[in-house]
Amino acid sequence: MKLLQADAFDLSELIRPGDTVLWGQANAEPLPLTTALMAQRARIGRFRVMLGIANNATCRPEHADHVDLLAYCGAGANRELGNAGVLDILPCHYSQLPAMIESGALRIDVLLLQLAPADTNGRYSLSIAHEYLLPALDRARVVIAEVNQQAPRTFGERTLGSDDLDAVLHTDRPPLENPPARLREADNRIAAQIAELIDDGATLQMGIGAIPDAVLGALLQHRDLGVHSGSLGDGVAQLMQAGVITNARKNRDCGRSVGGVLLGSRVIHEFAHDNPTIQLRSTAYTHDADVLASLNQLVAINSAVEVDLTGQVNSEVAAGSYVGAVGGALDFLRGAARSRGGLPIIALPATAGASSRIVTRLTGPVTIPRSDAGLIVTEYGVADLRGKNLRQRVECLLKIAAPQHRSALEAQL
């Protein structure tokens, strides 16, 4: 294992032209390594980067001079890359990523990690993220780690030893954080309606965005909730501290909140540190269809850009920009639909500016087909599309559209 010096290290000794480089997404990004990678791109020669959620604008449009940029989503700083025309999108379900990496269909040559310091046994925690990093660990030719003194030490499927790492950079910095969501009145009204649908003892999955955060804030009167989700944020930590989320009634992973990545601020980072009631797992587990179906009362709560009057959902493109992802929404909606007592929920404000988000025709792709539509929630009500024919769906969705747009939507039909 090579020790990298903080003031000067040459990644061209480890990374080759033509390589594909992957790192942990969002707050799991090993920022000193990724920043150096972009600064040294010309020295390395042309290579490719596979991006997840980008909380930091490490990759800039001008970096496309030597870097091919690929991502499964348009979230965060990726939006600027997409708008500049330098970002390729991998339109796949989140659950497909591990198999694609394992098979080599998505080739990963170099893996950059942020790790917590070694424990007394010399083992490193993967800290903020497990998810698709685990299959990449087994496929990458080179693994380079930032061992961050301030990274939380978390419990999960796997720890690493020195023999798993080709090079290590020691740092002492606060990890990246997500700013708190800005909640609007519509978000809180939607959250209140969803909270009424959730029974005590249910297991929650929360997508990314203001509405899932608002839902967590509306659950303070609930009891013995559980969590099995792709991401765990500040709201989960706060409800666990309040005794609302206990995971006591989960029929799987009882007593533990399960997720793939910590997606919040120092609140969740500090709560998860050395906390065995927080378990990070691989995408192959968190998004597995049979695992999700086996969870009783799984409530999947995800957002969308727009929904048409038959229940088709666009979660990817808004106003011509790629802002979302295929992601894991359909994985969890199908899991909740198979779960005993489960609820597959898509929630969105009824309007965006002056435009309706309940539409007669989607302006972007069909991310979620109408055959998988469950409950659609806006601030104006809940449309339960399960078992409804097309005519009934139109009637239900018109009722939860913004009142000022209903007559226009009927006329367009």
Image (spheres, helix red, strand yellow):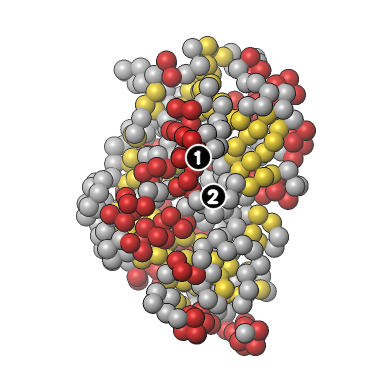
Regarding residue 148, the answer to whether it shows in the image is: no
Residue at point 39%, 74% (across, down): 386
Q: Amino acid at mark 1?
A: Met
Mark 2 and mark 1: span between their CA atoms? 10 Å
Position of residue 69 measured from the top left corner of the image (x, y, whole percent): 67, 38
Q: Amino acid at mark 2?
A: Cys
State left or right for residue 199 relative to residue 375.
Answer: left
Q: Report the residue marked by disc 1.
A: 100
Q: Quarter holding the C terminus?
A: bottom right
Q: Note whether 161 is above or below 182 in the view shown.
A: above
Q: Quadrant of residue 281?
A: top left
Q: Can you give x and y, in whole percent of width and height, for residue 291 in the image?
A: 32, 50
Q: Position of residue 328 (x, y in %)?
A: 47, 52
How packed is label 1: few (under 14 Cα within 10 Å), some, or many (20 or more)? some
| Callout 2 crowding tier (Cα within 10 Å): few <14, some 14–19, many ≥20 | some
Which disc number belongs to residue 92?
2
Residue at coordinates 52% horizontally, 56% vertically from top-left?
209
Q: Nearer the viewer, residue 171 or 317?
A: 317
Residue contact at pointers 2 and 1, CB within 8 angstroms: yes
Q: Which quadrant of the figure has residue 198?
A: bottom left
Which image quarter: residue 410? bottom right
Residue 340 visible, this angle: yes
Say if 215 sits above or below 42 in the image. below
Q: Position of residue 107 (x, y in %)?
A: 56, 33
Name the foreground residue: 402 vs 223.
Answer: 402
SS for dot 2: loop
Q: In the drawing, does residue 263 fall left or right of residue 33? A: left
Q: Residue at x 45, y 27 (%)?
A: 138
